[in-house]
Image (cartoon, rainbow, N blue to C red):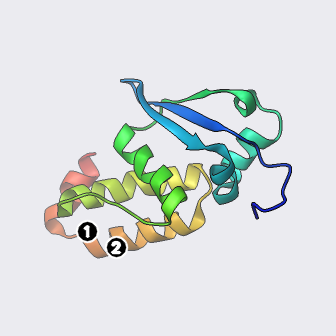
Amino acid sequence: KMWGDATLPEGKVTFIVGDDEERYEHVSKCVLCVRSVFFRTMFGIGMKERDAAEVTVSHTDLASFTALVRYLLTDQLDLGEGEGEQARRALVLRELAQMYQVPRLELLCAQALQESVAPATAVPLLEA
């Protein structure tokens, strides 16, 4: 998809994430656009973010957003350590995958949730 596609944006973007406004820097716009319809729309059709060097993402935390971007860049899913943490991260990441239109990641998170939810992890997950 990337080779010879002049419609893909050039450059990198820095994301300002969460209430603490933590920075995730130097992410390739081109790769994000190839992997996500949401980013392709954001950076490709004249929205204000197209030429922006920074984009604010206020609806999540840095660890979850980092996991989303790393998946888009590497095709590797990282849910963190610990059974309870993995279930929580899978739940949050699944929501991000829906929002950013990454169906394969959404499916992987749903599978991880299905495998990791047990009586010990269900209550903390529901409380989150």
Q: Nearer the viewer, residue 32 or 18?
A: 32
- Residue carrying label 1: 117
What residue is rendered at 55% in x and 69% in y?
A: 104
Mark drawn on residue 103: none
Name of the residue lying farthest toward the left:
120
- Residue carrying label 2: 114
What residue is rendered at 74% in x and 33% in y?
A: 50
Q: For this view, does 26 lie left or right of residue 5?
A: left
Q: Are marks 2 and 1 in contact (CB under 8 Å)?
A: yes
Can you say which quadrant of the picture contains the C terminus?
Answer: top left
Above or below — where is 83 with respect to 93? below
Relative image position of residue 77 (x, y in whole percent): 40, 64
Can you say which quadrant of the picture contains the N terminus?
Answer: bottom right
Q: Nearer the viewer, residue 73 or 95?
A: 73
Q: What's the CA distance linking mark 2 and mark 1?
A: 6 Å
Under mark 1, the amino acid is Val
Q: For this view, does 100 lie left or right of residue 96?
A: right
| Residue at disc 1, secondary structure | loop
Relative image position of residue 19 (x, y in whole percent): 39, 25
What residue is rendered at 33% in x and 54% in y?
A: 89
| Residue at disc 2, secondary structure | helix
Under mark 2, the amino acid is Gln
Above or below — where is 28 with respect to 78? above
Name of the residue lying farthest toward the top:
20
Relative image position of residue 69 (x, y in whole percent): 49, 50
Density class for disc 1 (Cα within 10 Å; few <14, some 14-19, many ≥20) is some
Density class for disc 2 (Cα within 10 Å; few <14, some 14-19, many ≥20) is few
Relative image position of residue 102 (x, y in whole percent): 59, 60
Above or below — where is 1 with respect to 49? below
